[in-house]
C-alpha cells in the first residue's frame, strides 16, 4: 500500500532545528510549531515506513544520540511530484504527462517529477541508492510536493 506524504517544502531557519526539512500544510510556507511539529520530513518518512511494515532498527544508544528512527529498507520505490501551487496529485501527474508529450498548450505553473526505484533506503543518511533525498528536496524549497513511497515485493 503506497504511502503519500504531502506539503510545502520548508527548510527551517529556526536555531532549534536549523536546516531541518518540514512538509507543512499551511499556505504561509512557514513552520508553526503548534501545528507543524510532527511535519518534520524524518518523522513523516519514518511513519510511512512503519505503515509499509519496515522495522525500526534504532537502539537505546541511538535514541540517546537523538536518532528517533533508523530504517534500512530494501526494495523501496519513491516518487516526487512538485508544483508551484497546491494541487491534487492526479492533476500534477496529468500535467506532467501532457507536458512530456508536448500536449500542454499553456503552462501557467511549474511542475516537477522524479522517481527512484533502488534497493537500500537508509534514513540515517536519507539516501536511496546514490541519491541524497534531503539535498533533492532542498531544491524544492517553497514548492508543494507529494512524496509517494512504496515497498516493492
Image (tube, helix red, strand yellow):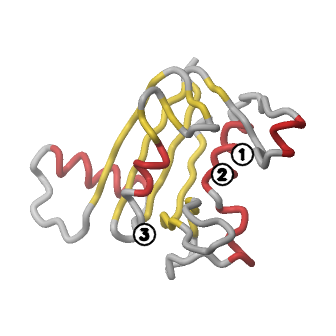
Kindly indicate whether the residue at mark 1 contacts the one at mark 2 (C-beta within 8 angstroms): yes
Query: In front: 40, or 102?
Result: 40
Name the N-terminal-most of marks 2 and 3: 2
Asked if residue 60 is positioned above or below residue 21 in the image, the reply reads above
- Residue 77 on image: x %, y %: 49, 31
- Residue 137 on image: x %, y %: 44, 53
Kindly indicate whether the residue at mark 3 contacts the one at mark 2 (C-beta within 8 angstroms): no
Name the N-terminal-most of marks 3 and 1: 1
Residue bearing the label numbered 2: 44
Asked if residue 89 is positioned above or below residue 106 in the image, the reply reads above
Query: In front: 53, or 55?
Result: 55
Q: Residue at x 12, y 66 (%)?
A: 106
Kindly indicate whether the residue at mark 1 contacts the one at mark 3 (C-beta within 8 angstroms): no
Query: In front: 91, or 116?
Result: 116
Q: Residue at x 49, y 31 (%)?
A: 128
Q: Residue at x 24, y 46 (%)?
A: 97
Please tell me in which quadrant of the rendered image residue 65 appears.
top right
Query: Distance of mark 2 from mark 3, alpha carbons?
Result: 19 Å
Q: Residue furthest top?
A: 153
Amino acid at each position: 500500500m503506497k504511502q503519500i506524504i504531502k506539503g510545502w517544502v520548508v527548510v527551517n531557519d529556526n536555531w532549534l532545528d536549523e536546516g531541518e526539512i518540514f512538509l507543512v500544510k499551511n499556505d504561509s510556507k512557514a513552520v508553526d510549531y503548534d501545528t507543524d511539529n510532527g511535519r518534520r520530513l524524518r518523522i513523516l518518512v519514518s511513519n510511512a515506513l512503519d505503515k509499509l511494515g519496515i522495522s525500526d532498527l534504532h537502539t537505546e544508544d541511538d535514541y540517546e544520540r537523538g536518532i528517533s528512527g533508523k530504517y534500512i529498507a530494501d526494495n523501496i520505490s519513491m516518487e516526487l511530484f512538485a508544483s508551484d501551487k497546491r494541487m491534487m496529485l492526479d492533476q500534477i501527474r496529468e500535467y506532467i504527462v501532457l507536458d512530456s508529450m508536448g500536449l500542454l498548450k499553456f503552462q501557467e505553473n511549474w511542475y516537477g517529477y522524479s522517481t527512484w526505484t533502488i534497493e537500500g533506503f537508509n534514513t540515517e543518511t536519507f539516501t536511496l541508492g546514490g541519491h541524497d533525498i534531503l539535498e533533492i528536496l532542498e531544491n524544492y524549497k517553497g514548492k508543494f510536493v507529494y512524496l509517494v513511497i512504496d515497498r516493492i515485493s
